[in-house]
Image (cartoon, grey):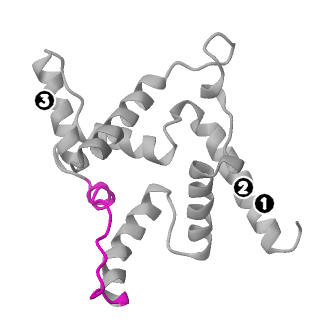
Amino acid sequence: MTDDELPEWERILSAGPIPVTGEATADDLAAVIKPRLEALLRVYGAAPTAEGWRALAIGLAIAYERALSMRGVADVPASEPGRRGDTGRLKLGRTLLGQAEQTGLPMSAVIEAHRQAERKAGRRPRAASTLHEIVRDARKLGGNLADLVLRQKFEAAALRAATDLEDGHG
Protein backbone atom coordinates (compact mmCIF):
# COMPACT_ATOMS: atom_id res chain seq x y z
CA MET A 1 0.00 0.00 0.00
CA THR A 2 1.36 3.42 -0.89
CA ASP A 3 1.16 6.31 1.55
CA ASP A 4 -1.67 7.93 -0.37
CA GLU A 5 -3.97 4.90 -0.48
CA LEU A 6 -6.85 4.86 1.95
CA PRO A 7 -7.01 1.68 4.06
CA GLU A 8 -10.17 -0.24 3.20
CA TRP A 9 -11.46 -0.26 6.79
CA GLU A 10 -11.04 3.54 7.00
CA ARG A 11 -12.88 4.07 3.72
CA ILE A 12 -15.74 1.93 4.99
CA LEU A 13 -15.97 3.67 8.37
CA SER A 14 -15.79 7.10 6.73
CA ALA A 15 -18.76 6.36 4.46
CA GLY A 16 -21.30 8.20 6.62
CA PRO A 17 -24.86 7.23 7.55
CA ILE A 18 -26.66 4.45 5.72
CA PRO A 19 -29.63 5.74 3.73
CA VAL A 20 -32.76 3.75 4.58
CA THR A 21 -35.91 3.91 2.49
CA GLY A 22 -39.22 2.10 2.65
CA GLU A 23 -38.11 -0.05 -0.29
CA ALA A 24 -34.99 -1.32 1.45
CA THR A 25 -35.18 -4.93 2.56
CA ALA A 26 -33.41 -6.44 5.54
CA ASP A 27 -31.14 -8.28 3.09
CA ASP A 28 -30.28 -5.01 1.30
CA LEU A 29 -29.42 -3.31 4.57
CA ALA A 30 -27.49 -6.31 5.89
CA ALA A 31 -25.29 -6.24 2.77
CA VAL A 32 -24.36 -2.62 3.56
CA ILE A 33 -24.02 -3.12 7.32
CA LYS A 34 -21.85 -6.26 7.17
CA PRO A 35 -18.63 -4.63 5.84
CA ARG A 36 -19.08 -1.75 8.31
CA LEU A 37 -19.32 -4.18 11.22
CA GLU A 38 -16.25 -6.04 9.92
CA ALA A 39 -14.31 -2.75 9.77
CA LEU A 40 -15.47 -1.74 13.25
CA LEU A 41 -14.42 -5.11 14.65
CA ARG A 42 -11.01 -4.54 13.06
CA VAL A 43 -10.63 -1.15 14.77
CA TYR A 44 -11.26 -2.86 18.11
CA GLY A 45 -8.98 -5.80 17.27
CA ALA A 46 -11.87 -8.23 17.52
CA ALA A 47 -13.15 -11.14 15.43
CA PRO A 48 -16.83 -11.91 14.68
CA THR A 49 -17.06 -14.37 17.57
CA ALA A 50 -18.92 -14.20 20.87
CA GLU A 51 -15.74 -12.90 22.53
CA GLY A 52 -15.17 -10.42 19.71
CA TRP A 53 -18.68 -9.00 19.94
CA ARG A 54 -18.26 -8.74 23.70
CA ALA A 55 -14.96 -6.88 23.23
CA LEU A 56 -16.60 -4.52 20.74
CA ALA A 57 -19.54 -3.86 23.06
CA ILE A 58 -17.19 -3.16 25.98
CA GLY A 59 -15.00 -0.90 23.82
CA LEU A 60 -17.99 1.11 22.61
CA ALA A 61 -19.48 1.29 26.11
CA ILE A 62 -16.18 2.60 27.50
CA ALA A 63 -15.97 5.14 24.67
CA TYR A 64 -19.55 6.40 24.90
CA GLU A 65 -21.08 5.58 28.30
CA ARG A 66 -20.14 8.01 31.08
CA ALA A 67 -20.68 5.38 33.78
CA LEU A 68 -17.93 3.23 32.21
CA SER A 69 -15.53 6.04 31.38
CA MET A 70 -12.11 6.12 32.97
CA ARG A 71 -9.93 8.89 34.36
CA GLY A 72 -6.37 8.29 33.29
CA VAL A 73 -3.04 10.00 33.08
CA ALA A 74 -4.09 12.37 30.27
CA ASP A 75 -6.98 13.59 32.43
CA VAL A 76 -4.61 14.75 35.16
CA PRO A 77 -4.01 18.52 35.06
CA ALA A 78 -0.70 19.44 33.40
CA SER A 79 0.57 20.86 36.69
CA GLU A 80 0.32 17.49 38.47
CA PRO A 81 3.04 14.82 38.34
CA GLY A 82 2.37 11.88 36.04
CA ARG A 83 1.08 13.91 33.11
CA ARG A 84 2.40 12.61 29.79
CA GLY A 85 3.24 14.94 26.96
CA ASP A 86 2.18 12.88 23.93
CA THR A 87 -1.08 14.68 23.37
CA GLY A 88 -0.05 16.29 20.04
CA ARG A 89 -0.88 13.10 18.17
CA LEU A 90 -4.22 12.94 19.97
CA LYS A 91 -5.01 16.55 19.12
CA LEU A 92 -4.24 16.00 15.44
CA GLY A 93 -6.43 12.87 15.30
CA ARG A 94 -9.32 14.71 16.94
CA THR A 95 -8.86 17.67 14.61
CA LEU A 96 -8.97 15.48 11.49
CA LEU A 97 -12.04 13.61 12.78
CA GLY A 98 -13.75 16.93 13.50
CA GLN A 99 -12.94 18.30 10.04
CA ALA A 100 -14.37 15.19 8.38
CA GLU A 101 -17.54 15.44 10.45
CA GLN A 102 -17.90 19.19 9.91
CA THR A 103 -17.32 19.13 6.16
CA GLY A 104 -18.91 15.77 5.36
CA LEU A 105 -15.84 14.89 3.31
CA PRO A 106 -14.36 11.39 3.39
CA MET A 107 -11.35 11.03 5.68
CA SER A 108 -9.06 10.52 2.68
CA ALA A 109 -9.95 14.01 1.40
CA VAL A 110 -9.46 15.58 4.82
CA ILE A 111 -6.06 13.91 5.18
CA GLU A 112 -4.97 15.00 1.71
CA ALA A 113 -6.05 18.58 2.45
CA HIS A 114 -4.03 18.46 5.68
CA ARG A 115 -0.97 17.17 3.82
CA GLN A 116 -1.32 19.92 1.18
CA ALA A 117 -1.60 22.58 3.90
CA GLU A 118 1.56 21.23 5.53
CA ARG A 119 3.42 21.39 2.20
CA LYS A 120 2.15 24.92 1.57
CA ALA A 121 3.40 25.95 5.02
CA GLY A 122 6.85 24.62 4.10
CA ARG A 123 6.66 21.62 6.42
CA ARG A 124 7.21 18.01 5.46
CA PRO A 125 3.80 16.31 5.72
CA ARG A 126 3.33 13.02 7.49
CA ALA A 127 2.59 10.03 5.29
CA ALA A 128 -1.10 9.52 4.56
CA SER A 129 -0.91 6.04 6.11
CA THR A 130 0.50 7.54 9.33
CA LEU A 131 -2.33 10.08 9.43
CA HIS A 132 -4.88 7.28 8.95
CA GLU A 133 -3.30 5.45 11.92
CA ILE A 134 -3.52 8.62 14.02
CA VAL A 135 -7.21 8.97 13.13
CA ARG A 136 -7.86 5.28 13.82
CA ASP A 137 -6.18 5.55 17.22
CA ALA A 138 -8.07 8.74 18.08
CA ARG A 139 -11.35 7.06 17.11
CA LYS A 140 -10.65 3.85 18.98
CA LEU A 141 -9.19 5.38 22.10
CA GLY A 142 -11.53 8.29 22.31
CA GLY A 143 -8.43 10.29 21.54
CA ASN A 144 -6.65 9.43 24.77
CA LEU A 145 -3.33 8.13 23.44
CA ALA A 146 -1.45 8.85 26.66
CA ASP A 147 -3.64 6.29 28.39
CA LEU A 148 -3.30 3.41 25.93
CA VAL A 149 -1.85 0.96 28.48
CA LEU A 150 -4.32 2.02 31.16
CA ARG A 151 -7.19 1.72 28.70
CA GLN A 152 -6.09 -1.79 27.73
CA LYS A 153 -6.02 -2.74 31.41
CA PHE A 154 -9.43 -1.12 31.92
CA GLU A 155 -10.89 -2.98 28.91
CA ALA A 156 -9.47 -6.28 30.21
CA ALA A 157 -11.08 -5.64 33.59
CA ALA A 158 -14.41 -4.78 31.96
CA LEU A 159 -14.26 -7.96 29.87
CA ARG A 160 -13.53 -9.97 33.00
CA ALA A 161 -16.48 -8.35 34.77
CA ALA A 162 -18.74 -9.17 31.79
CA THR A 163 -17.55 -12.77 31.79
CA ASP A 164 -18.13 -13.01 35.56
CA LEU A 165 -21.67 -11.72 35.09
CA GLU A 166 -22.28 -14.24 32.33
CA ASP A 167 -20.88 -17.08 34.42
CA GLY A 168 -23.02 -16.06 37.43
CA HIS A 169 -20.10 -14.91 39.60
CA GLY A 170 -21.41 -11.34 39.84
Q: Secondary structure at mark 3?
A: helix
Element type at mark 1: helix
Dots 3, 1 in contact, CB < 8 A = no
**Is residue 8 located in the magenta-colored stretch of the structure?**
yes
SS for tag 2? helix
* Label 2 packing within 10 angstroms: few (<14), some (14-19), many (20+): some
Q: Amino acid at mark 2?
A: Ala
In the picture shown, does residue 54 fall above or below 84? below
Mark 3 residue crowding within 10 angstroms, few (<14) / some (14–19) / many (20+): some
Q: Residue furthest left?
A: 120
Who comes first in sequence, dot 2 or dot 3?
Answer: 3
Image point (44%, 43%), residue name: 137
Q: Examine the image and state in which quarter residue 36 appears.
A: bottom left
Q: Which residue is mark 3?
A: 116
Which image quarter is the C terminus in? bottom right
Q: Mark 3 and mark 2 in contact (Cβ < 8 Å)?
A: no
Residue 169 left/right relative to 67: right
Q: Is residue 154 left or right of residue 64?
A: right
> Is residue 9 depicted above or below 99 in this figure?
below
Question: Does the magenta segment cover residue 36?
Answer: no
Residue in the foreground of this view, choosing between 109 and 7? 109
Residue segment shown in magenta: 7-26
Q: Which mark is residue 158?
A: 2
The numbered disc on residue 161 is 1
Amino acid at dot 1: Ala
